[in-house]
Image: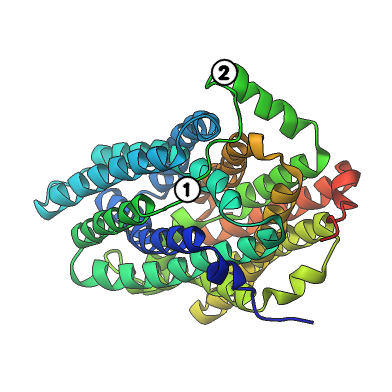
Amino acid sequence: MPVLPDIDPLRRHRDFRVLYFGQFVSLLGSMLSYVALPYALFQITHSPKLLGLLGVIQLVPSVVGGLFGGALADTMDRRRLLLLCEGGMTLCIGLLSVVAFRGALSAPLLIAASAIMAVLSGFHRPAIEALTPLLVTKEDMASIGVLSSFRYNVGAIAGPALAGLILAKQGPALAFALDAVTFVAAMIAVRSLRNIPAAPSSARFSLAAVQEGFQYAMSRQELIGTYLVDIVAMTFSMPNLLFPAVAEAFAGSRDGGAAYLGWLHSGIALGALLGSLTSGWTRSVRRHGLMVLWAAGSWSALMIGFGASHSFPIAMAFLIAAGYADMISGVFRSTIWNQTIPSELRGRLAGIEMISYLSGPMLGNTQLGLLAGLTGVRRAITISSLIGLAGVVGCAGLLPKFRRYLAKER
């Protein structure tokens, strides 16, 4: 049985390789801002509740961007859409870095920048998701899911680790500036693509086109399952925006925790990277629905342990194991999507997918932030994750077709 991930698509498809590594560089920069923005907000406000509310503030723009960005990805030149989004993100984060260097950051400004980036990301991600399957073959789909997870996980390890060092030594301004530079690198990569297929759909951008995507998604229980299970697990068991408060608690200092923060943000990705590097076995598994349920339930169970941990090494062990489970869930969800969704609907369904995997963490951070204000940060994570585990078990009973879903033979 193969163990290592399949990298053959990178060898055989030049445009996929260029896009892949361009987004790799951009991801590293985005992870710097991902850590720096809530850190800067917490240093200004010292409010776990506001960190949690940042999730809802990001969710609404992400939903809007995902809905309409998915429809645009099915009807317009995807390279142009990617360049417009990346240009907008470069401008936004670049301006934020200038303000940070001048020492003029404020909570309203950070929240506004976060909302703008969420909108642009909502248009950007469906374009990437819709374009990628057209640059490879159908036989590559499972391998593409693993490679995408590998890219994300390496970025999610290296980015936060570097962010922790930058924040401890230089502050958020440099992190934002480096992010802007990596967006420029991603734009260069997109412009160098040679053979981008035209949008496969003749549909015009409209509300009816958006509705068509939703109707298809709701007609397939295997798709509903991938959305619902992930939303439930992440809504009750995703504490990433509370990491600044957790890091401060481990550091034992109101102004400390930057070094712990980088490790906490990297912990989930470390486990996911381990999953990516040993993911060869996933190609021989056909019970994809059952695997998503198992992995999502494991995520919530491990987050119960994370919340109950008062030792930093033990807490990190739970985070790493949870990251492994999340990666397994992501691989099988991605394969289900790529095997069951028609090409002409791929952009719109990618938008729905994005909403599903963003809404859970964003809603989860909000409710965890509010609960933390009542019970304390660690206890809130434990209590909420217990609810998440029960919810995943409930989904298994409510969605029998999803639970029994078998992958198509290759």
Q: Earlier in the sequence, mark 2 or mark 1?
A: 2
Residue 188: x and y in percent read 30, 55
| The disc label shown at residue 193, or none | none
Q: Is residue 231 left or right of residue 28?
A: right
Q: Secondary structure at mark 1?
A: helix
From the viewer's perspective, is residue 1 above or below residue 167?
below
Q: Quadrant of residue 296?
A: bottom right
Q: Which residue is mark 2?
A: 207
Q: Viewer-nearest of labels 2 and 1?
A: 2
Quarter of the figure that contains the C terminus:
bottom right
Q: Residue, x 12% and y 55% (percent of image)? A: 101
In the orientation shown, which residue stands out farthest toward the front?
A: 195
Q: Is residue 115 left or right of residue 378?
A: left
Q: Which residue is mark 1?
A: 373
Depth check, front residue: 198 or 154: 198
Q: Is residue 364 visible?
A: no
Residue 31: x and y in percent read 38, 60
CA–CA distance between discs 2 and 1? 40 Å
What amino acid type is highlighted by mark number 1?
Gly
Q: Residue, x 75% and y 39% (percent of image)? A: 224
Q: Residues within 10 Å of mark 2 (few under 14, many from 20)?
A: few
Q: Residue, x 18% and y 67% (percent of image)? A: 170
Residue 199: x and y in percent read 55, 35
Q: Secondary structure at mark 2?
A: helix
Depth check, front residue: 378 or 340: 340
Q: Residues within 10 Å of mark 1 (few under 14, many from 20)?
A: some
Depth check, front residue: 41 or 378: 41
Residue 73: x and y in percent read 51, 35
Q: Is residue 170 left or right of residue 163?
A: left
Q: Quadrant of residue 208?
A: top right
What amino acid type is highlighted by mark number 2?
Leu
